[in-house]
Image (spheres, coloured by chain):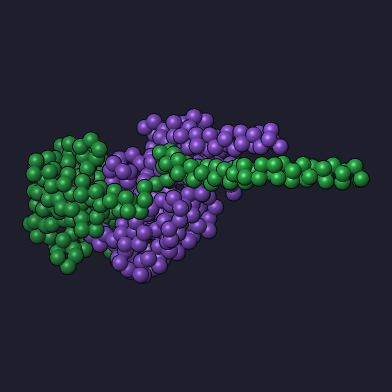
Chain colours: A green, B purple
Amino acid sequence: MDRLQTQHTDGREAIVASARDGHGSARDRVRSVWLGVVAAIAAVLLFGGIGLAAAGILRPSDSVMEEIVEEAGVRNASYLAEFIRGGGSIRDLPIIEIESYALAPASAEEAMAAAASVVRGTVRKVSFASNASGGLPIATSVIGVTDVAKGGMPASITVMQVGGPVAQPEGGALAQLDNDPLVAAGEEVILLLTEPDAMGIFHTLPGAGVSFIRGNVVEATEANRFAADVDGRSPEAVLAMLRTADQATR
Amino acid sequence: MRSRRSWLSRVILLELVFLLALPWLGAVGVGAPVRAGDTYGSAHCRSSAKLCRTTWSGDNSVLRLRIVNQLGSSQLLARAQTAYGNWNSARGPQSFSGSARTNDSLIYLKRDDTLPAPNGYVLNCTQAACPASMPANILYSEVFVPLDNLDYGNIAISVFGHEFGHTLGLRHHSCCTLMTQGTTYTSPHAYDIGALPSCTTSLTNDSSLYGVRCIYHWDAD
């Protein structure tokens, strides 16, 4: 114990002696060590932050994010305008399917109960417009009605769908909801429609609203849960099946 | 004393070099963990397990998501808050908030009244495109719902919960989960969260669905 106390005292005396010998330089050294530590922390914060950003761990700032979102909207709007000007066909574009919430009806009976009207017709014209919400474009189609399976319909109706051409890094794509494929001008279709809105515009029933007729054969869409009752049949047979299903629900 | 001081300064110097180099090493993929910004070839984040959003720090790290309200309806916002509160109560890496947090990932809530209710959709976006054709590194998301969802009671919450699942990178499930189309669930199901340890089993018949734990390699709970 005595020896330890002696050593401790000796050590302190040595430090004090050393400090007394070089009073100014010791203080400078302490100061420079602290300056070094502060500089090191600053460097880590600065360069580390840049590094993290480069690694993708940090996202762009809020203001930059706002610009990115705005630029995406501008790009989509200008691509859509260019697409319309060029008279392009949506069938030439790759498809981006946007998953949506709405459930497709499980059966033809369920679909007919949900549909306000069912028609066979030809798509005379489709026009696209940017969506004021900033969402997917709006597709408005004029359908020439050739047959009706439910509801009293005029010779021509207007149908609105959500989706349309959007900009991509290389060209564009057709963005459409996974349960509501867009129709294109010249195509023949069977449409299951909801009640028209206040403007008299119809909407397609999610999941079962659109079936295409190609070579007098009906093709249900992937989302259609009663596709087996529709696929490969003639339009007349499908409309008859839907009328029967409608009777069954009354 | 002098030798101890010089040893200490060397340690500090080495530590500095290491700290400065670490992020850059990560950026070039040298010994780095799976981390935000990584890509997995052309694989979709939903089909190849792990990583959907760019601001995620790697395995077992929390994914902070900030809800940016642009709905213009306090009633719709209240439904959204319930929906993300339910996601926060579930296990997994997801942590939604209406307030800004360091390096959070943004989800914009918007209204699309052209959509017949009840419905909703999500655009998952990269810096280059919105929507992105193959979201593997989502920079931000936009959730769109119609105001008329409010006419359908708790379905308005279900729609938000479902769409938030898409923002996490989950895709549709055929039956009985929050990610099932037309769901009446308002909280995530065990299938939506996934197995523990992550990615060990899909829990479901669909072998490509492993839940949010797998997408972000979350084994922390």
Q: Tell which of A8 and B62 is nearer to you.
A: A8
Q: Tell which of A172 and A104 is nearer to you.
A: A172
Q: Is residue B62 left or right of residue A187?
A: right
Q: Position of residue B82 (x, y in %)?
A: 45, 64
Q: In the image, what residue occupies the spot 40% across and 35% down?
A: B39
Q: In the image, what residue occupies the spot 46% across and 34% down?
A: B24
Q: Position of residue B25 (x, y in %)?
A: 48, 32
Q: Is residue A21 left or right of residue B196?
A: right
Q: Residue furthest front?
A: A21
The answer to which quarter of the image holds residue A132 is bottom left
Does any portion of residue B174 appear in the rendered image?
A: no
Q: Position of residue B106 (x, y in %)?
A: 38, 53
Q: Residue furthest right?
A: A2
On screen, residue A149 above or below B132: below
Q: Position of residue B178 (x, y in %)?
A: 44, 54
Q: In the image, what residue occupies the spot 32% across and 46% down?
A: B125
